[in-house]
Amino acid sequence: MAIDFKRELENAARSMILVHDPDILIKTIIRAVVEKASIEHASVLLYDPKRQAYVLSISGGSLSKKVPVGFATLDKDDSLIRFFRERNSRVIFKSDILTLSGADKVLKDNALSGRLKSLLNDVIYQIKLLDTVVCIPSYFRDELLCLLLLGRKRNGREFIAQELDFFLALASNMAMAIRNAQLFKELESELDKKHQLFMRTTIALVAAIEAKDNYTHGHTTRVTNFSLQIAKRLKAKNKKLINEKFMESLHIASLLHDVGKIGIPEQILNKRSVLTVGERNRIKEHPLIGATILKPIKELEESIVGIKYHHERPDGLGYPDGLKGQEIPLIASIISVADAFDAMTTDRPYRSALYRDEAIKEINRLSSLQFSPLVTEAFIELCREGVL
Amino acid sequence: MAIDFKRELENAARSMILVHDPDILIKTIIRAVVEKASIEHASVLLYDPKRQAYVLSISGGSLSKKVPVGFATLDKDDSLIRFFRERNSRVIFKSDILTLSGADKVLKDNALSGRLKSLLNDVIYQIKLLDTVVCIPSYFRDELLCLLLLGRKRNGREFIAQELDFFLALASNMAMAIRNAQLFKELESELDKKHQLFMRTTIALVAAIEAKDNYTHGHTTRVTNFSLQIAKRLKAKNKKLINEKFMESLHIASLLHDVGKIGIPEQILNKRSVLTVGERNRIKEHPLIGATILKPIKELEESIVGIKYHHERPDGLGYPDGLKGQEIPLIASIISVADAFDAMTTDRPYRSALYRDEAIKEINRLSSLQFSPLVTEAFIELCREGVL
């Protein structure tokens, strides 16, 4: 085969498709072109839809010194860009590719219209500044997606037709891979946005619900923070215990652990005097009410478990089900400690706040009775280190 | 070039990367292989992670008749699959590719171990059932992703080495493209799930908040339904008026239009006697409270406008800002009609429900005063046609 770098570059190109970061993709492919085809340098002008302009990515160091300031981004009206967007190379050279030698020849023949001649002169001026001898466009659905710019070959020879054909195909593959990566990135960013929307809306609604209860301002935010810190510490001690899905479920469960209070009358929630047994029992319904509200949402299954059981105790004296010891799911045990610590250290209608140290001592004392020993241990560590 | 279909198939393969539906991708590429390379038929056994098995996709009709029932899905322990998963073709043929003629030759030479011989015999039996003469595997990170199975060439000749090399590269490209498409599909399905999670959680929390107000059971669901129907009708009349983003914003705004009621004391919301002026004014705060709750969420900007202004009136007598006529955003005007219609046709603490026909007449009478004429017109049409 006349061009011996072909197979190697094809192999490099093959793996492009699974590189879903456009920047890494471009850098990888340019580096491969420069190395395998022994070219002094290569670069890509890639269309950036956000800036509505073509941005230069460069391989190697030699070119970067020569690129004048302001040349790194070319807008749509730039002559080099216009030349290819209007497909002038097809008109002039009967090919998509523009070579410096071809352009010089055409200009000498003097067969061009005044407009094309002036445009081509501008283009030549520009590609000389970029130290480029070959420009290869890539189109996607008739839009100019990128321009592959090649420097001279290291052996000083001219590019032959077969090589140019190969680079044209390669540029087309590259354009497809770049477009693919861009689409991937867009989808990922949409997913991220949707996640943010979900979390923020939940937080806003929970805050509004919380505002009904005069005595718990900021409680949810603090409990969520404590829970996530405890879980991180547990993960550091034992990776197998906690995965990313668990962290997300815990985050949501912590945000929503008291959502069931929406089903408790305001007069009971905000009563300043001691609660009657009946009223206490009404308040104890909140974990179950919370679980019931969210029950239809299959994706929240793990979070619902945390909400439902965050008032269970290892000694079996908790509610709603009186679960014992290991029967209590970890997600609920974490929220239980976080919730109790915040309740102890803030004023409530029926009593004033404990000092921080007293609260920590109390939680430690209740380990294995009210709180999971595993979670208590992690919590105490975090307190001792000043993280909580 | 020895193989004249090469360029055409390469061009077909190039566009594969942007086909993000694995099924369409496979069908397209198999069809291209059969046509351009003049093969009787071709098929692909593709790994399906869900079923943990390899599933057959077939081009053309000739093969499908020959595939025995039960052959459409091969599990991981199937001999054909095992043969390639264990890379036996490398051991036996010093190549990833298995050809029927090569296998026959190796068996005649009798140089194989008993285990390999028996496995190869099983494989030959199986590929003969599939009417296949060449099997080309594709691996992705050492996992067998798919098997490309080729029928005989239409001109009766054997495949030459160069052709097989080409198909091996093609199969590898295909594997990458399939994996890419699968990743895309997974990401899309994650996005869809996240959207569902957002909508369902919002609906659940809104329903819980709504339950505080004894008199509005099911109000939100009905208003949301009416709003979306009206918007669809407006879109049918004038496409430019409403796009997909607007529909989503309207959906969310309708769900959350009364969320501000969480800020109004229960005694006022559920009062059975006539409200005082002070109490009325408290209730009138709910659009602004709702907008305030959601204000931090940038993505809900358009929805917040709908929530904030759904009690404005074209005659300027609405609240909170007393906007007039065209100053009222369409999203709010739609919710306004939907909200009023549901309120009129259900019992409230202070009055009993109007009959449907009376309510429609009333809304029509208040067009341009309380309701946007454009929205009223669409609403009346839907009522007349029995949609609402």
Image (cartoon, coloured by chain):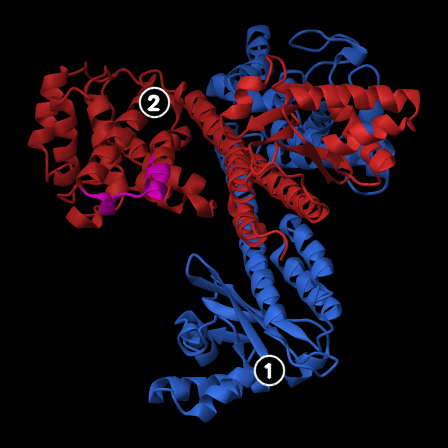
Chain colours: A blue, B red
Residue at 71 percent across and 83 percent down: it is A156
Q: Is residue A365 visible?
A: no
Q: Is residue B242 magenta?
A: yes
Left or right of residue B349: residue A75 = right
- Quadrant showing the C terminus of chain B: top left
Tell me the kind of residue under disc 1: Leu
Q: Is residue A243 magenta?
A: no
Residue A324 in the image: x percent, y percent? Answer: 77, 9
The span picked out in magenta is B238-250
Q: How many marks?
A: 2
Return the chain for callout 2: B
Instruction: Find disc 2 in the rendering and name its residue.
Output: B221
Q: Secondary structure at mark 1?
A: loop
Residue B237 in the image: x percent, y percent? Answer: 17, 39
Dot label at residue A130:
1
Residue B205 in the image: x percent, y percent? Answer: 47, 25
Most foreground residue, B193 or A89:
A89
Same chain shared by disc 1 and disc 2: no
- The vertical placement of B41 against A278, above or below, is below
Other residues around mark 2 within 10 Å, as few (<14) / some (14–19) / many (≥20)? some
Left or right of residue B178: residue B108 = right
Residue at 58 percent across and 83 percent down: it is A69
